Amino acid sequence: MSDRRFRFGVAGSPASGAEWMTTVRRAAELGYSTVLMPDGLQLPSPFPSLAMAAAVADIRVGTFVAAATLRTPRQAAWEAHTLTLLTDGRFEFGIGTGRPIAEKQTADVGLHWGTARERREQVIETLEILRELDGEVRTPIMLAAGGPKALALAAERADIVSLAKDATTPREEVAALAAELRTLAGARADDIELAMNLLAAGTRPLPPWTKRAAGVDAETLESMDSLMLLRGTPQEMADELQRRRDTIGATYISVNAGYLEDLAPVIDLLADK
């Protein structure tokens, strides 16, 4: 389905400057392409955190994803363009309309949450301003998409698309969503990189926070062959990722930072594939 080569990212956030530098440097040493950071008032701000990450290692950085409602469109575009400039083009701007938790946080920063349509329009306005600020440079855009309107927007605007489905979504449904994205994208379908984020990789038991993150307990998640898990030996995991590329088209694989070492052998097995 896709002949695009794999690349790998690590998703996490800093608990301290020293810990963050250690994670970023280790990710670069192990061959990860990107360090990604989520957005939310419960976490350190992603933009200075990612600037620090790009300064301590030769690695790409990205928001995964910034909540559009937590900043005005011009502020978000300004932050994104600044990171593109300071990293010499190593920044990828992931942006979305915000998860449910972002509604209260939007009020906390004194901004308007808005309807689903208003939030999509805010994303579009942010991207338009970013394009103006970028000028001759170009910040790659990642959009998370699950519903029909978000999928259409991603098909039109995104360089990278993360299919926004929960951990219990069957792989057949995810594959169908990916196929719909390609249909909507038309001539630019081959230019879109499909991303998939993993809660866990390898053979270690799932962590206690799995239920909070996935909405179901660890045993249920394991039994249902969730796409948010990648289990087995390095070779078994590599084989499974190639199946996912063949059936879904996903080639940009990110993993929770707690499993950075577990996925690393797979990067070596899939190098140049």
Image: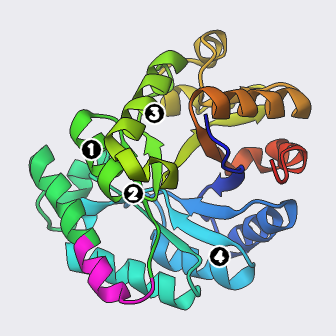
Q: Is residue 74 above or below residue 144?
A: below
Q: Give the residue drawn at x 11%, y 48%.
A: 117
Residue stretch rendered in magenta on the structure: 128-137
The Cα–Cα distance between marks 2 and 4, rounded to whole angstroms, is: 24 Å
Crowding at dot 3, Cα within 10 Å, few <14 / some 14-19 / many 20+, comes out as: many
Q: Amino acid at mark 2?
A: Ala
What residue is disc 4 on? Answer: 53
Give the residue displayed 58% in from the left and 87% down from the top. Answer: 88
Q: Earlier in the sequence, mark 3 or mark 1?
A: 1
Q: Tell me the residue at 83%/42% (across/down).
A: 262
Number of numbered discs overlaid on the protein picture = 4
Position of residue 223 measured from the top left corner of the image (x, y, whole percent): 65, 9
Residue 146 located left or right of residue 257: left
Asked if the residues shown at circle 3 and circle 1 are in contact, with their CB atoms under 8 angstroms apart, the answer is no
The amino acid on which the numbered mark 4 sits, given as a three-letter code, is Ala
**Element type at marker 2?**
loop
Quick one: label 2 or label 3, which is nearer the N terminus? 2
Q: CA distance from mark 2 to mark 3?
A: 14 Å
Q: Amino acid at mark 1?
A: Ala
Would residue 117 be found to the left or right of residue 194 on screen?
A: left
User: For the residue carrying disc 4, how many other residues have a C-alpha within 10 Å: few (<14), some (14-19), or many (20+)?
Assistant: many
Q: Residue furthest front?
A: 187
Tag 4 or tag 1, which sits nearer the N-term? 4
